[in-house]
Image: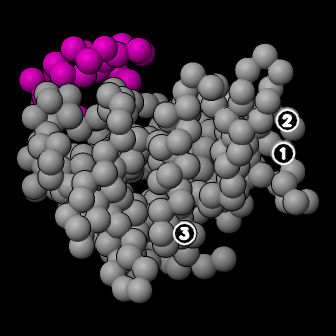
Amino acid sequence: MKKFDDQRCCATRFAGLFKGENVAVKIFASTDEQSWLREMEVYKTTMLRHENLLGFIAADNKDGGMALQLWLITDYHKKGSLFDLLMSTTLDLRLMARLARSLANGLAFLHSEICGTSDKPAVAHRDLKTRNVLVRSDNTCVIADLGLAVRYFAKTQELDIPHNKKTGTLRYLAPEVLSDTLNPNHFDSYRRADIYSLGLILWEICRRAGDKPDPCELPYYDQVPAEPTLDDMLRCVVLENQRPPLPSRWKDSPPLVTMTKLMRECWMPNPSARLTALRVRKTIDDLAPLIGDFMAP
């Protein structure tokens, strides 16, 4: 197996072969068994297969000599994360829309319940960021890293929350998570927090798009330190109600005007005022008359 650089979580990642196919292998230390068990459990959720979600292949444990290794084997995407792509590539408006639309499509599926012979629960991600989104060879997104996900089973009204106190990446946390005012017993609370994070990712994508793209930056790059604390983010996002700056050049591009409106409606301070992932996807679909068919192969 070949190790590759990935800062998405504390696990080590490798590229390898499984039954003759290229795969990604995420290796957890034995001390992080709960995280491995949780992510495996979520990936094995009934009907949790979708073109815009990372494909789960298998889980296993191996004797690494000094310590037990816990393996999670998934599809391999050589382009890496959305963060990697944005760091190295500028986008035309079609590629901007393709990335944004496929991301929203994956999140809409994740958030949805499917009832039938086999029921799919609604799932909220809770750690959505550009490092946790991978890019396929066709430049569409797949959502990865479901270790913090919450599941809601509508038939039994069961809310399945992971047994750890991790809450995601500080820079991407919604105001209600930062201020500890999120209702932990209401699934929609988690869904709406995901939408806030989605709005920040749309901002990152749009910065790299158009005739005069801006440098790749993380949300709040000029408003908080490089390694912000909870207090830094609480001050910026909640107390001062700041959001990432919107480049003035976006006003001259109708597609970017639409995207600006979308991200603003995703990161509203009032969670109930935020859009759904399905509404985000449908609004991006409406850009096709302006920029052409951006989802064609």
* Residue depicted at 53% across the width and 64% down the height: 52
Element under label 3? loop
Q: Could you tell me the amino acid type at mark 1? A: Gly
Q: Residues within 10 Å of mark 3 (few under 14, many from 20)?
A: some
Q: Could you tell me the amino acid type at mark 3? A: Arg
Q: Return the residue at label 3.
A: 49
The Cα atoms of the two marked residues, 3 and 1, are separated by 22 Å
Choose top left, top right, bottom left or bottom right for residue 274: bottom left
Q: Return the residue at label 2.
A: 2
Q: Return the residue at label 1.
A: 16
Direction right: furthest residue: 20
Mark 2 / mark 3, whichever is N-terminal: 2
Choose top left, top right, bottom left or bottom right for residue 272: bottom left
Mark 3 / mark 1, whichever is N-terminal: 1
**Residue 203 visible:** no
* Residue depicted at 10% across the width and 34% down the height: 181
283 horizontally vs 3: left or right: left
Q: Quick one: quadrant of the C terminus?
A: bottom right
Q: Could you tell me the amino acid type at mark 2? A: Lys
Mark 1 / mark 2, whichever is N-terminal: 2
Is 282 within the magenta?
no
In the displayed structure, would residue 203 be above or below residue 176? below
12 horizontally vs 186: left or right: right
